[in-house]
Image: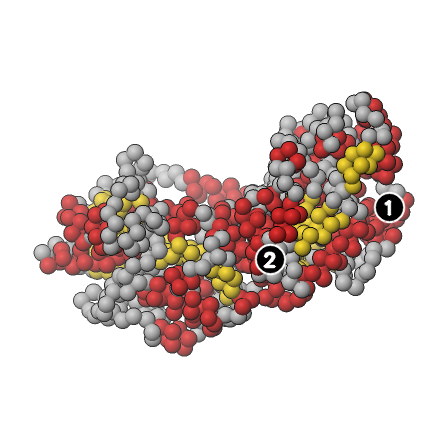
Amino acid sequence: MKTQFSAYNLQQQRNEALLANSLYMRRSVVSSVPPLQLDIEQLSRLSDEDIALFEGLQIESARLAIEAVASLAQINEVDHMGGGLDMIPPLLLTLALVNDEAIDFTIENAHTSVGYFSALSTLGYLDRQHVVDTFRRGLDIPGHVAWVPGGTQLNGGRLGVMIPTAVGQALGKRAAYGADAWVLCHTGDAGWLAGHALNGFHAASVHKAPITFIMHVNGIQLSGSTQNITGADPRPVLESLGIQILETPSLHDIAGLWQTLREARALAREGVPSLIYPTGKYDVPLAQIGDKLGIAEELAQFAGANGVALDKPVWLPGCLMSYRDLPSMLECLFYVNNLPGGKAHHDGHMKGRDLAAILANPMLQLTDEQACALEHWRALAPVSITTEARPAPGSENLLISADAVAKAGAALPAAGGKWVSPRAGVALAYEMMAKAHPDAMFVIDCDLAPSTKVDLALKVLDAEQQFQLSIEEQIATMVANGLAMSTADPKLVVFATFAAFFEGIAREGMEMWRYQRNLNGANEGLNVTFHLSHVGSCTGRDHFSGWSLDWINLAIGYLPYLDRFYAPADARAAFIAIRDLAARSGAHLIGIPRDNLPVLTAQDSDAPLWNPDSPWTDATQLRARPGARRAIVAFGASAYVAAEAADLLARDDIPADAWVVNGLPLEADRLETLFAQYPDGIVTIEDGLIGAPETGLRGFAGLVRGAAHGRALPLIHLGITDPRIAPSEGHLELWRYFGIDTLTAVAALKAL
């Protein structure tokens, strides 16, 4: 017997083993931790004991972070320890404010993860030794911010991305909790300059998001100081975008930061987004810094070794890179002041360093007051906190009653009439969802609602359920992701724009799905729908402008993160697809053609192929002829061509079946069944790029060809092979030019 080798099955076995050895990647994790919840509106100032507690927590977290990176050094690896250490003090205060309901947080500069994991461990959510032993070496404690018990669901990736995403999260919180909503977003002093970050700040202002950004101004970037890399002060830029700037001397001054946070909280209640900016202090003598931090001897020795006088006036940043790690912290201080001995520690490490000596420095020692405060806090009765994974893709989301479906579906175009755009079904379906679930549906528009056909839904939804972002398609995807993560309730979050914009400028939102890890360990798409309107080459007479020739390849590339990808072939199929995607949790892409297509009919009938309450299926048989040993399989809009080709061949007594694929993924045995059913061969047809000899086969054609590997099965693929030249005419003329037409399909079926 021939043995089948399955790389996929082997990978699933490895996945299961990895999850089995994890501590935290579960559907549910229960944590027993000492209580640390502060009411910022009721508590006007922190007590001396509060301050001692937070300073003690800082020291223990910093020691843990340093030990974790020292363990990493044993395998000759480094980490962003410098930024991770300066993250700890303000992050601990943030963690005392959030409640995972109305108030939440995330981290934009996610390479600071060692500080994040260490803080969560100190608070009792993560096992201390597990952080030390497995940081950046296992599934639980990776090298960037990721979701673990007590942490943020919004895993970090590219710099700047979390700014618009956190805005979406804040807007979703506001819809659920009103004025009580508040999101805190820690950010570095580099990522704010990214285009999507700037657009995100703008969106926060335009939509009055209840959000506070906390900028860690340490003055150091990857390859140089912030001043030398960008030379731009973020305050006037962000203030011009509508962000209220709140200055505070230092993020390490817990008492002062508390007061600034109280100001930010009050602003959030009024719908005013803010940025907390630690100014630091200028013209401070080095000796004074040593006295202030309790390291006078260490600073004097370091300055002397580098020939710098102790009366030298310097800038003391409001957020010190490598905070509490000597001498790295001093090297960073000298670096941002252009002094001899200065070094950047963006990629901080412990290679070749004496761990015991570092842990013995004065800034990592507890005072009696701090030790006492920690002891008292840990003696408090623990609270039990359960962290639940997000709903699995495909689980129940928003359902529609049969009466609502029948009422909305009655307006769908009938079969046998004039051709109509599938967008007609889109408009009715989204309007139906908005009426049935007005508090659970959100729509993001980029000045295209009349074209993408979300306009009827917008007329139904309240102002806080819809967001206009002009032409900022890139950040609209991230705002949508943030909205999807704002609460655990079922919801339908839709961002609709032209498919060509997803292919070109809005892919960042889908890229986020690659690093949004669920608590079960899998990287997955969120519960959000990206609506790709105007797919394929059917975009009127404007030649290549706005074409979406790669839409099928785009969706296939993100298929591991999708629940379903929908490619409806007519207006009625579009209605069914939207009804289906709303009923299922998970990430969804739906591709809708712009131009008019016939409403598909059942074989030898004038009745429509689909009714409003028809179940969605991955594929539908359009034509079934007795004795057929060959078939044409169409993807989405080209379905009517497949049906016409099968009908023409039937007139010549050549039996051929026709199928339409309504979306992906296909059922597990779908292609195997088709291959067995049609031994004389299959023709595929699609309105998208299928590649050329020099590029290889792509699109749905590539998927079919790959599945048929090793079979003696004739295959012919129709689609766009050379996209460089085309006429500027209507879509039917264009399809004929590319060979996506009935006569070409008939010839291909005969050629099998």
Identify the residue at the far left of this view.
652
Which image quadrant for residue 365? top right
Q: Is residue 602 above or below residue 12?
A: below
Please identify, in this view, whether the residue under mark 2 or under mark 1 is nearer the observer: 2
* Amino acid type of the residue that numbered disc 2 sits on in the rendered structure: Ser
* Amino acid type of the residue that numbered disc 1 sits on in the rendered structure: Ala
Residue occupying the point 64% across, 52% down: 239
Q: Quadrant of the N terminus?
A: top left
Closer-to-camera residue (607/31): 607
Q: Is residue 67 above or below residue 734?
A: above
Residue occupying the point 80% across, 22% down: 307
Evaluate whether residue 547 shows in this view: yes
Q: Mark 1: which secondary structure?
A: helix
Q: Quadrant of the C terminus?
A: top left
Q: Mark 2: which secondary structure?
A: helix
Q: Is residue 464 above or below residue 479?
A: below
Give the labeled residue for mark 1. 371
Closer-to-camera residue (541/662): 541
Which image quadrant for residue 582? bottom left
Give the labeled residue for mark 2. 205
Closer-to-camera residue (691/311): 311
